[in-house]
Image: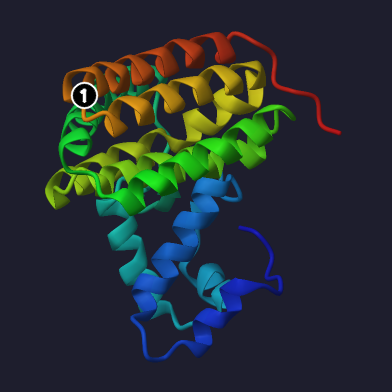
Amino acid sequence: MPRKAPGPAHAIALLQSNSLPTLVAHELERMIVAGDLIAGTKLNEESVADMLGVSRGPVREAFRALEQAGLVRTEKNRGVFVRQISLDEANEIYEVRAALDGLIGRLAAERIQPAALARLREIVRRMHAVGRARSADAYFPLNLEFHDVLADAAGNRALAANYRRIVNELNLYRRETLARHADAIPISTRDHEAIVDAIARGDASLAERLMREHVMNSRERLHVALSKAPPHSS
């Protein structure tokens, strides 16, 4: 477990007007997505409570929420671990994500509001900027934000909830893909730009196709990335 350190996490103890289990779950999710808690890490209830400045009860509830979200797993008599999926599982999940993303693209083309469209264009602009530096750490959160905005723009809460669970399960591999294959960042950005253009024109069929292709191309880039050696630490 990471050692206790100053930062936003400690504000959790002060936010008594909110649900502590929800805040704990959000902070652990952030750490998992950011790679601070890697796949396979054991999460100790007492250590997490101490790190976030809360009691063990909210941590226990947060673990249950994270398990439902597909981010952790509970092993009988062993404890709670950050979920680790095999490459075969990732391949299957990518296929499901392609179907969900295709539907998101179609519905977003039909339903997107001007504010959401403007936000997508701004994210793509920032993607181009960080892409020139081939910065995976800067690009990864933009990629998550882009698809999150699109999921909301589809206007279907059940679809968005299922999509986000799938995304959670793939986040470890997606970060690894970007880290090992940073040259693909401009390609991914162009994909995003084409998707936004199709949605802006209201071309639902094209948006659906481009979203599906984007996901399956991402899966192919994953295989290329995993065939390469990890980047050297600086």
Residue 4 percent coordinates (x, y) = 68, 70
Residue visible at 20% across and 43% down?
154
139 relative to 113 in the view: left or right: right
Residue 25: in sight, yes or no? yes
Quadrant in the picture for the C terminus: top right
- Name the image quarter holding residue 162: top left
Residue of label 1: 203
Q: Quadrant of residue 8?
A: bottom right
Q: Which quarter shows the N terminus? A: bottom right
Residue 179's image quarter? Answer: top right
Q: Position of residue 18 (x, y in %)?
A: 36, 84
Is residue 75 shown to the viewer in this render?
no
Callout 1: helix, strand or loop? loop
Residue 13's spot in the image, x, y percent? 51, 85
Q: Disc 1 residue type?
A: Asp
Residue at x 38% of width, y 80% of height: 20
Question: Is 163 or 90 nearer to us in this picture?
Answer: 163
Which residue is located at x 44 percent, y 27 percent?
Answer: 192
**Furthest residue in direction right, as rendered:** 234
Taking the image as shown, residue 111 lies to the left or right of residue 221, namely left
Residue 26 in the image, given as x and y percentages of width and height = 42, 64
Q: Looking at the image, which is closer to me, 67 or 208? A: 208
- Above or below, 42 against 125 in this view is below
Q: Image height check: is 25 above or below 187? A: below
